[in-house]
Amino acid sequence: MEIGKLQRRYLDFTSTLFHEGFLDNQFTQLQQLQDESSPEFVLEVVTLFFEDSEKLLDELSRTLDQQAVDFKKVDAHVHQLKGSSASIGAQRVKNVCVAFRNFCEEMNQEGCLRCLRQVRNEYFLVKNKLETLFALEQQIVAAGGSVPMMW
Amino acid sequence: MENSLHSSRAEAFPAGLRVLIVDDDPTWLKILEKMLRKCSYEVTTCSLAREALDMLRGRRDRFDIVISDVNMPDMDGFKLLEHVGLEMDLPVIMMSIDGETSRVMKGVQHGACDYLLKPVRMKELRNIWQHVYRKKMHELKDIEIHGIHEDFNILCYGSEDPDDRQFVARTEMSPARKRKDLDGKELTELEFNDPSTVKKARVVWSVDLHQKFVNAVNQIGFEIGPKKILDLMNVPGLTRENVASHLQKYRLYLSRLQKQNEGPNGESRGNYELNCSNQTENFQTQGIVPSVHVGETKKAPSSDVLLSFDDKMSPKHKPSLGGTNVDREFDTSFCQYPSTLPPFAPEDAKDLFLTDYRNGHSTAIPPTTCKIDSVSLQVKRGTANAQDIGAICKLEGPTSLQDRYIDDKHSQGCFPLTYDSLPEDLHLCSVQKIGCFESLGFDGTEILRYAEESNWYDCPELNGEYSYDQVVDYSLLDEYLFA
């Protein structure tokens, strides 16, 4: 595919991500932070996010799987996940975390489990989207073009 | 070398601002680091609060400002905030994804100079230099009005109504007070600002620090003044003002102990001691004086003294706990009599202290100073009687304070008598004063917790709210007194 087309596809894709609420302005901030001194900045940050989140999700599964659920612990993890997702602008993940914390406060195990499922879904969705985004970027660069930015 | 570094940094200000970022979230750490670097700041990252503290302690002048997340696994961000404020006196900015008013309030109460909500924007970080600058300005002003301050302190503390609320406000309100002083040199009640505006770093009077203080005071006495004491102590980072306020508390503490001495007769001294040893009392929690840790073991005098400022009354003032509490109540009551007591003038304190010194007590306030023996010796005016262990302080000659409350003729200052002579309304008055603590906006509980963590005292319950119900049960008090 020629560069122009790749770039347009990239822009369309990015635009959709924002419109569908997968990503918010924080992601744009990250893109703006990227510069010559850290050309892979966004990728690095997002990778950190992936690692951290998957650890948290595992922890959450473990904690909620107990007979006697330690809701304080669950809440702490969710709070972390909320913070993490906010850091890269993973809006939908963050929103589920908000609901998740409410269930923790209510000590509602059923509610928490539902939220866990939901947050997992959202996480893997956004992970998938971001990986696609990076792949598109690589394609453009490989084709000799430069990655267009939204702002 | 230092100078040139400093000056070059100063010229480039705010570029080169040395920031320490503490956040357990690796994603945020990376993002914030990048943002700060883009602001031309010098960034150091840290994912553990303890690590951060070590770094800060390692080189006190290594950083200009600290930014920390509120929720961290190894230590509460507020705790870190307090540590930094107390030990290093650096501006600290708190961050959190949680923007609830109560949390923000907590940050402010603990001394945060700002509270940022995540996601943090570049523009917010760009402006953090103002906090550093502001602090520097205040420090300069402080140096300028040093002399005025000292006189003022003595004036105020010596002769003013040591209303507890005001007292605490005064000692805690350093920056506000300084500002006021500088503005108009108006030495009026301007000092009694709303405690909730406090953000000045507070000195934590650790055991060692207090020991140094006591030694210094022993050497030169009260009258010389905080500056000399400060010099003698030779503690870096400690200001004359810290010493001054500590000194006042100490004086009041001694005066209180003096009152206490007029308590039970000599024989019961022993009991009193025993009782003391069962209690863990905290003068500190009475908001005025350093902590007198009446530990379970008769530890070395210096080991338990003193804590950071605190405004809450100890909920452990339960009459059921025996003599100590009685005296504590009594003690408390006296502490609360400012409006009716003649002011405790500095000279008195000096006498008290020097007496103690003459007696060879190297520490003015051993923790078991509830052992009124040593205290009584301390407070004896003009007599050094080391053998008088167990005997109540003989009041040689009139003292402004004692005259009103203690019958000179009673060499074994009968506690009941003295206490008895206190009018009911004074008791009430004390309750009022106790109430003052409670109503203080300044939250002393955090400091308590902080001190707890450091094992400076063993009162786990001290972080409770002071309630009238728990304390000062006068009927029980009487029972103990007159039993």
Image (cartoon, rainbow, N blue to C red):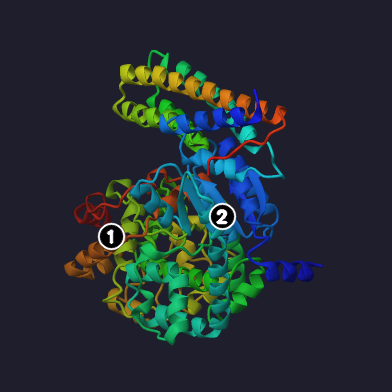
Closest to the observer, B457 or B62: B62
- Provide residue B83's location: percent of width, then percent of height: 54, 53
Q: Which residue is drawn at 57% across and 60% down?
A: B90
Closest to the observer, B18 or B184: B18
- Provide residue B372's location: percent of width, then percent of height: 43, 61
Q: Please give the residue where the numbered disc 1 appears in the rendered image.
A: B439
Tag of residue B84: 2
Closest to the observer, B149 or B339: B149
Taking the view exactly as shown, the residue that stands out farthest to the right is B1
Q: Is residue A38 above or below residue B171?
A: above
Q: Which residue is drawn at 36% across and 27% down?
A: A100
Protein chain holding label 2: B
Per the model, the C-alpha gap separating discs 1 and 2 is: 26 Å
* 1 vs 2, front mark: 2
- Relative side of B430 to B239, left or right: left
Q: Report the label total.
A: 2
Dot 2 falls on a residue whose secondary structure is helix
Q: Is residue B405 above or below residue A13?
A: below
Q: Which residue is drawn at 53% across and 73% down?
A: B138
- Provide residue B86's location: percent of width, then percent of height: 54, 58
Quadrant of residue A39 in the image?
Answer: top right
Label 1 CA crowd tier, 10 Å (few <14, some 14–19, many 20+): some
Amino acid type of the residue tagged 2 in the rendering: Val
Protein chain holding label 1: B
Amino acid type of the residue tagged 1 in the rendering: Ser
Closest to the observer, B443 or B43: B43
- Provide residue A8's location: percent of width, then percent of height: 56, 31
- The answer, for residue B298, to whether it is visible in the render is no
